[in-house]
Amino acid sequence: LGAVRLAKALSFNTNLLHLNLAGNEIGAEGALAIAKSLFSPAASSTSKREKYQSNTALKSLNLSNNLVSDEGANAFAKALRHNASLAVLNLSRNRINTTGGVGLL
């Protein structure tokens, strides 16, 4: 629940550059919410293709040791395709297997 609330705040972030959430057991729901906060559909989308507006403030995010699964890794992979400003994403010591790892490549 805390990670979901934090994710909502991150979607409006313009000042926070580095965030360390290591060891907080955010799990699947929290990981999905945080990944989604790194990009969001642009409010003024006029085409059938979804347009994305990225959170451009955050430069590094440490989510090590948080019970993130392949589903979370894939959500971050999708987010990173639309977010060029996040330079460091630490997902070490999570429950990410080959499926999630390949998605991040």
Image (cartoon, rainbow, N blue to C red):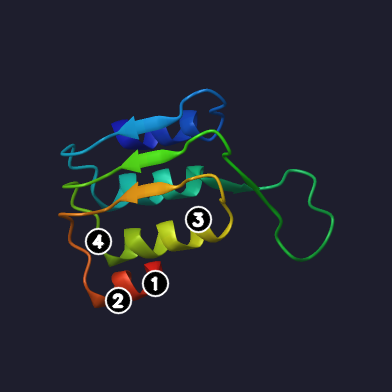
Judged by depth in the image, the label closer to the viewer, 1 or 4, is 1
Question: Which comes sooner in the sequence, label 1 or label 4?
Answer: 4
- Confirm or deny contact between disc 2 and disc 3 (CB under 8 A): no
Give percent across and percent down for residue 91: 26, 53
The residue positioned 53% from the left and 35% from the top of the image is: 11
Label 1 to label 4: alpha-carbon separation: 12 Å
Label 3 to label 4: alpha-carbon separation: 15 Å
- Confirm or deny contact between disc 1 and disc 4 (CB under 8 A): no
Q: Which residue lies furthest to the front in this view?
A: 87
Question: Which comes sooner in the sequence, label 2 or label 4?
Answer: 4
Q: Which amino acid does label 4 sit on?
A: Ser
Question: Which comes sooner in the sequence, label 3 or label 1?
Answer: 3
Label 2 to label 4: alpha-carbon separation: 10 Å
The C terminus lies in which quarter of the figure? bottom left
| Residue 1 seen anywhere in this rendered image of the structure | no
The residue positioned 57% from the left and 26% from the top of the image is: 14
Label 2 to label 3: alpha-carbon separation: 16 Å
Q: Name the residue under label 3.
A: 79
- Confirm or deny contact between disc 1 and disc 2 (CB under 8 A): yes
Label 3 to label 1: alpha-carbon separation: 11 Å
Q: Name the residue under label 2.
A: 99
Q: Name the residue under label 4.
A: 69
- Confirm or deny contact between disc 3 and disc 1 (CB under 8 A): no
Judged by depth in the image, the label closer to the viewer, 3 or 4, is 3
Tell me the element at label 3.
helix
Q: Which amino acid does label 3 sit on?
A: Ala
